[in-house]
Image: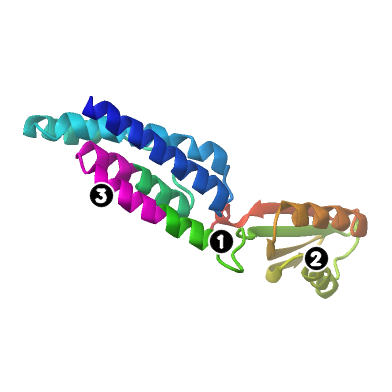
Amino acid sequence: MVALEHLAIGAVLSLVLGVLYVRFGRSLSNRREFSRVFPIITLAVIIVITVVKTSLALSLGLIGALSIVRFRTPVKEPEELAFLFLAIAAGIGLGADQVGFTVSALGFTFVVIVLLGSWPGAKARSQNLYLSVSSTAESGEIDVPALAKSIANKLLVCDIRRVDASAPETRVSFHVEAADSAQLFTFLEEFRLEYPNVELTVVEQQRVPGV
């Protein structure tokens, strides 16, 4: 019966954690989909800790079993890792019968998350992007200073990172930031109208090594 109560408390805490992550998180990943794993992680940890906490043999066996686990999908952002740790911490605390401390500590953490998310000036993280523009002799030469000025007027940040001017192609790479997807799509539409024959590639900065 106690274990069932712990599972119920863990489910509630992890659901609240998921709601806070969706509401106040700043990661660019699909936060709603990611938050759905929090209850599963918390409940799984509660079950494991409850089973092995009274047996040294089971604890040693757990170490051997977990040694074969491999995660093929990396956690991309520190914020995702922080929320995963909170879900795991809730499971460990409840599984170890530390209900009062776990609920109090998670409640305090939830308050901190809300305060940080509601702090004056707090906003969703801007999109950190790698923008590559290329043209050929047929499509027309790129006026790099004018292009950089045009991009800077439409986005938050525009820094030239690389220029390759080898005939017959000219390629210019920028680090840019957009406030949100709406600003980015507006920029793309205006860019196509202003430079209809120029090839444009936009990639998330975190996925571009060495930039």
The residue that disc 2 covers is 154
Q: Quadrant of the N terminus?
A: top left
Q: What's the amino acid at mark 3?
A: Phe
Q: Which mark is residue 101?
A: 3
User: Number of labelled discs?
Assistant: 3
Dot 1: few (<14), some (14–19), or many (≥20) neighbours within 10 Å?
few
State the CA–CA distance, disc 1 to disc 3: 26 Å
Q: What's the amino acid at mark 2?
A: Lys
Q: Which span of residues is magenta-colored?
A: 88-109
For the residue pair 2 and 162, the one nearer the viewer reads as 2
The residue positioned 88% from the left and 59% from the top of the image is: 137
State the CA–CA distance, disc 1 to disc 2: 27 Å
Q: How is the image coloured?
A: rainbow
The residue that disc 1 covers is 118
Element at label 1: helix
* Residue 68 visible in the current orientation: no
The residue positioned 20% from the left and 39% from the top of the image is: 97
In the image, is 74 to the left or to the right of 42? right
In the image, is 53 to the left or to the right of 197? left
* Residue 148 visible in the current orientation: yes
Q: Position of residue 82 (x, y in %)?
A: 40, 52
Q: Is residue 68 above or below residue 137?
A: above
State the CA–CA distance, disc 3 to disc 2: 50 Å
Q: Position of residue 65 (x, y in %)?
A: 21, 30
**Residue furthest left in the image:** 56
Nearest to the eye among marks 3 and 2: give it. 3
**Residue furthest bottom in the image:** 145
